[in-house]
Image (tube, grey):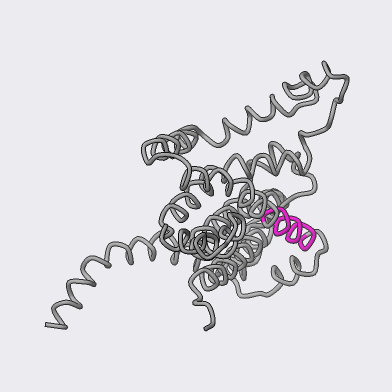
Amino acid sequence: MPRRRLIYAMTWRLPLIIWQAAFFLVPLGFMVVMTFWAVRNYRMEPDFVLQNWEKMFSRGYFWDAYWLTLGRASLAAVIASLVAFPASYALAFKVSPTARRWAIFFMIIPFFTSYLVRAYAWQVILAEQGVINAGLSHLGLGPYTMLNSGFGSMVGYLTLTLPLVVILQTFSLASVDRNLIEAAWNLGCSRWRAIFRVIIPSAKVGLILGAVFCFILSFGDFVAPYYLGGSKPPTLSILIIDTTKSGQQWPRAAVVAVTMIVTLLVVAFAAVSAAYRKPKQ
């Protein structure tokens, strides 16, 4: 009987395993192998050299791009989590289930359109002669430089990730046991203390996962830093493009890509471990 159950379980897991192997593990393995290839006369040749890793890791512009990307992605995760929490709290505790479903539906709608189209729309809004500066000019303010800056990149990151963070937080907060909240109030907890001592710890899995998704999407995003941030200074995703254009240096670009993947895996595993870690008794 246990053997039959194992076969049954593996039968249903097999498609997922094949999918992950075909579209993640195999391409990742090929990318790692490519980092050791050489480029001679603008052509890649299979080889086993460490020159690509040494070249990239010894360059200051690589580490500048790495820390810039890491810092912006972390900031986007913090901002998105803080901005999303009041909306998620209201949807979880202040509105009816019907209103909550409609709100989630409207937050899903932006994903029906291309992210690139939304980025171009923000170009019109954030430009020096755009909608925001035109409105501020009537108040005697501006114009302010919002496009082709770090602020523009952050707007793009939040455009991509904020609805998703709100949805994840809402689902997590809505699943919090109401009896725990009522017990906290009966024991004299104020509303704010109940939020920080009961609600947030009970919903920490969803809150952390929302922040992690925001970090992952922002860390690897190309559209926001390129079209809204001006691509200068470059993030890692832009650095990959610049590296491939420089003498067909695909192996060095693969080094950047592998570094990004390793960073994301470390952050994701650390965040998931923190989310599901049981509190010490």
Q: Identify which residue, 214 or 197, lies in the foreground.
A: 197
Q: Which segment did they paint magenta?
A: 62-73
| Left or right for 10, reference 117 | left
Q: Quadrant of the N terminus?
A: bottom left
Where residue 66 appears, as percent x and y from the top left, is 73, 60
Q: Main secondary structure of the magenta part?
A: helix
Q: Identify which residue, 120 or 253, lies in the foreground.
A: 120
Q: Going 53% across and 77% down the picture, which residue do you hit?
A: 279
In the depicted structure, whether residue 21 falls above or below residue 106: below
In the depicted structure, whether residue 39 falls above or below residue 75: below
Where residue 161 appears, as percent x and y from the top left, is 57, 46
| Left or right for 143, reference 92 | right
Give the image quarter of residue 36.
Answer: bottom right
Number of numbered discs: 0
Q: Going 68% across and 39% down the picture, which residue do you hit?
A: 155
| Left or right for 13, reference 50 | left
Whether residue 234 is in magenta: the answer is no
Where residue 158 appears, as percent x and y from the top left, is 62, 43
Where residue 226 appears, as percent x and y from the top left, is 69, 41
Q: Identify which residue, 88 or 5, lies in the foreground.
A: 88
| Left or right for 142, reference 153 | right
Q: Going 41% across and 61% down the picture, which residue do you hit?
A: 179
Whether residue 71 is in magenta: the answer is yes
Q: Going 39% across and 63% down the picture, which residue do you hit?
A: 20
